[in-house]
Image (cartoon, rainbow, N blue to C red):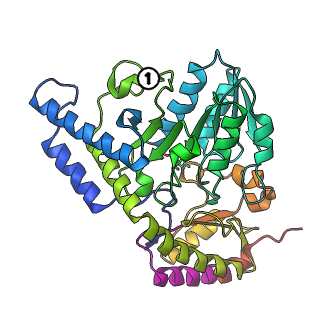
């Protein structure tokens, strides 16, 4: 079986698994405890926070360990909206965010906040003119993702940060960085980012672990209460093994980033070229996208059918994001990019990882051709 779903999750580094196992076996103290075992765990947690901060060129006090990006996005968006509601109740995001961002805004809207959902162009890039027009005096927060999890579209984060801060320097800027970290370079200072979310399992770290960067001076209304861990922003006994593993995975991802981009970018180009030649497929990813995601539609066929046919040929691919792959609604992201319902309901995502080789891509291409030959008679022609 060849695994082509690295945007959903990645196989962890062996080093990461070994580190976690060692810490769970040998350093199991509660980092808040006053005795030796507690101090030992607290030291490990402190060092992990320093490593994460170094990777982002920020301060350790600005790093909050979380259970992943769904939690990080919720803490950042709802926490900021609630904390600063006296400044205003206007928020901005885009129509193509991950559900863990999008649904936060839907929830806040139902509670009385006003939300502007910015449109995107046919490649999925946000309309900067509309952003400039949208930021107001009472805009508390803008949340825009770095890389889209379905199509791989890269947002111009540096320009977005400048526009927001020029229009209103008090408006906070949150970036869901999940699909960009380890693939593209990240510069939170230059981007003028106040809040930044990561999830470790997307870059060969453990599942259920991530970080939220909170710029010094930014306060968040805590969604959970009951303890003073993580400066009260995320109370509860810290998962020391996960925190150390996140730090390790971040360091490794950064060390390998250039090499990853180079290697995987070439494989992606090969795949894109080939998919363009299959007349039944419609490419939804642009060549300017992130190096690890290729997204296309096979109109006239339920995408699960292609997924299962490819699986029989030893290839594991996905439909849309893992969080929404079980709902058969057309993709909100593709609809926002102006695709019709048929295309938006027949999307397939292939996401590449560090382990892939050119030979693997050739085998995948062969399997795609074989599947089309088999399934073509079953497709429903569009009128
Ligand atoms: N944001 C994006 C862009 C994602 O791709 C994902 C994972 N599908 C998340 C947030 C949620 O991350 P987690 O699995 O850590 O909750």
Q: Quadrant of residue 356?
A: bottom left
- Asked if residue 130 lies left or right of residue 242, the reply is right
Q: Quadrant of the N terminus?
A: bottom left
Give percent across and percent down for residue 304. Answer: 61, 63
What main secondary structure does the magenta stretch of the protein show? helix
What x and y, as percent, mark residue 17? 26, 55
Which quadrant of the figure contains the C terminus? bottom right
Q: Nearer the viewer, residue 68 or 172?
A: 172
Find out whether residue 226 is within the magenta segment: no
Who's the residue at 53% across and 48% down the image? 177
- Asked if the stretch drawn in magenta spans residue 357, the answer is yes
Side of 150 where 282 appears, left or right: right
Q: Which residue is mark 1?
A: 224
Q: Residue at x 48, y 82 (%)?
A: 358
Asked if 66 appears above or below 288 in the picture, the reply is above
Query: Is residue 331 among the parts visible in the rendering?
Result: no
Q: In the drawing, does residue 132 fall left or right of residue 218? A: right
Residue 367: percent from the left, percent from the top? 56, 81
What range is drawn magenta here? 351-372
Which quadrant would residue 122 be assigned to in this image?
bottom right
Q: Residue, x 16% and y 30% (percent of image)?
A: 38
Decide: few, some or many residues near mark 1? Use Cα within 10 Å; few <14, some 14-19, many ≥20.
Answer: few
Q: Nearer the viewer, residue 285 or 281?
A: 285
Mark yes or no: residue 31 visible.
yes
Label 1, secondary structure: give it: loop
């Amino acid at each position: 079986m060849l695994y082509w779903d690295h945007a959903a999750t990645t196989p962890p580094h062996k080093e990461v698994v070994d580190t976690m196992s060692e810490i769970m076996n040998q350093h199991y103290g509660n980092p808040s405890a006053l005795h030796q075992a507690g101090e030992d765990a607290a030291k490990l947690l402190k060092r992990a926070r320093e490593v994460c901060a170094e990777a982002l060129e920020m301060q350790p006090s600005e790093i909050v360990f979380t259970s992943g990006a769904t939690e990080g996005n919720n803490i950042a968006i709802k926490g900021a909206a609630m904390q600063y509601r006296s400044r205003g109740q206007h928020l901005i995001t885009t129509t193509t965010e991950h559900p863990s961002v999008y649904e936060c805004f839907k929830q806040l809207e139902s509670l009385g906040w006003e939300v502007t959902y910015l449109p995107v162009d046919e490649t999925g890039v946000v309309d900067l003119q509309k952003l400039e027009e949208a930021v107001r005096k009472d805009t508390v927060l803008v949340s825009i993702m770095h890389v889209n999890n379905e199509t791989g579209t890269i947002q111009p984060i540096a320009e977005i940060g400048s526009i927001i801060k020029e229009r209103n320097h008090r408006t906070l800027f949150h970036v869901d960085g999940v699909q960009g970290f380890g693939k593209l370079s990240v510069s939170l200072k230059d981007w003028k980012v106040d809040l930044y979310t990561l999830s470790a399992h997307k870059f060969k770290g453990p599942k259920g672990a991530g970080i939220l960067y909170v710029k010094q001076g930014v306060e968040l209304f805590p969604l959970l209460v009951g303890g003073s861990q993580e400066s009260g922003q995320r109370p509860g006994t810290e998962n020391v093994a996960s925190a150390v593993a996140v730090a390790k995975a971040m360091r490794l991802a950064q060390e390998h980033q250039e090499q990853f981009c180079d290697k995987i970018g070439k494989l992606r180009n090969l795949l894109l070229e080939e998919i363009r030649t299959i007349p039944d497929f419609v490419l939804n990813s642009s060549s300017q996208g992130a190096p690890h995601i290729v997204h296309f539609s096979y109109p006239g066929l339920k995408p699960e059918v292609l997924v299962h046919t490819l699986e029989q040929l030893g290839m594991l691919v996905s439909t849309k994001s893992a969080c929404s792959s079980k709902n058969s609604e057309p993709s909100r992201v593709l609809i926002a990019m102006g695709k019709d319902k048929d295309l938006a309901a027949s999307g397939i995502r292939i996401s590449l990882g560090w382990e892939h080789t050119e030979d693997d891509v050739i085998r995948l291409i062969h399997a795609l051709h074989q599947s089309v030959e088999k399934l073509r008679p079953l497709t429903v022609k569009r009128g």
